[in-house]
Amino acid sequence: MIKVYNTQSRKKEELRTTEPQKVQMYVCGPTTYNYIHLGNARPLVVFDTIRRYLKYRGFDVMYVQNFTDVDDKIIMRAQEEGQEAQEVAERYIAEYFRDAEALHVMKADLHPRVSQHIPEIIEVVSSLIDKGYAYVKDEDVFFAVESFPGYGKLSGRNLEDVLAGARVDVDTRKENPFDFVLWKGAKPGEPSWESPWGMGRPGWHIECSVMAMK
């Protein structure tokens, strides 16, 4: 029997899979604006080790690790270097694979990229708006944290405790200081896609959620 730590229950529990002897793993990969550093490398090695162990124990493992190739940091780096954002992302994706190989980290079965899943992201954001979990302000879409009673259940902290000791970016358009952006309206010179809310791009929080579901 294999036990894993459940962040929600705060205890070790028996590993139970949705299908017998099959494991699906989604691991958050790097934001491709620079070379990976030690902090990036650690989870890559850790989750690769977990994958290898599960395969050793006889599990059929589907291992997915994304590349965040649409992000503020990539846009900033592209502006500094006088390149297109996608050129910067492609360069550091190639560097990632070189570093991962040097660490003996196996490639994932799938390496999805944010730029390849814009339609799915728009679909999910639209669904959250329809269900009352998100709202539109100008050409931006925000997630309403108070609409989700389970928000914070994994960290074990409630919004009141966090608000008391945190610094939060002030945006007067937010209904709650902790609301976060799901879709950002386009600014001049930034990569953007057409959406029901105007030209724009996804916010960081929604990207892995959509790719994991996909």
Image: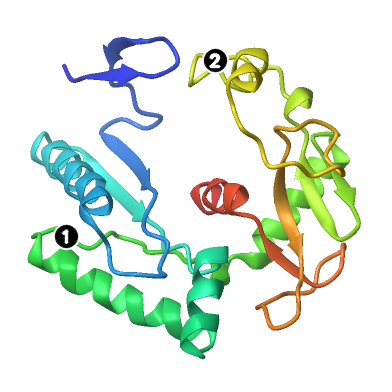
> Of tags 2 and 1, which is closer to the observer?
2
User: Looking at this view, is 74 or 43 the one in front?
Assistant: 74
User: Looking at this view, is 35 or 206 the one in front?
Assistant: 35
- Mark on residue 106? 1
- Residue 85 in view: no
Residue at the spot 18% in from the left edge and 38% down from the top edge:
50
174 to 150, vertically: above or below: below
Where residue 90 appears, as percent x and y from the top left, is: 40, 81
Q: In the picture provided, is 135 more to the left or to the right than 111?
A: right
The quarter of the picture where residue 134 lies is top right
User: Looking at this view, is 50 or 24 the one in front?
Assistant: 50
The 10 Å Cα crowd at callout 1, few under 14, some 14 to 19, many 20 or more, is some
Determine the residue located farthest toward the right in the rendered image: 138
Amino acid type, mark 2? Arg
103 to 69, vertically: above or below: above
Residue at the spot 79% in from the left edge and 44% down from the top edge:
171
Total marks in image:
2
Where residue 58 appears, as percent x and y from the top left, is: 13, 37
- Mark on residue 157? 2
Q: CA distance from mark 2 to mark 1?
A: 36 Å
SS label for mark 1: loop
167 to 92, vertically: above or below: above
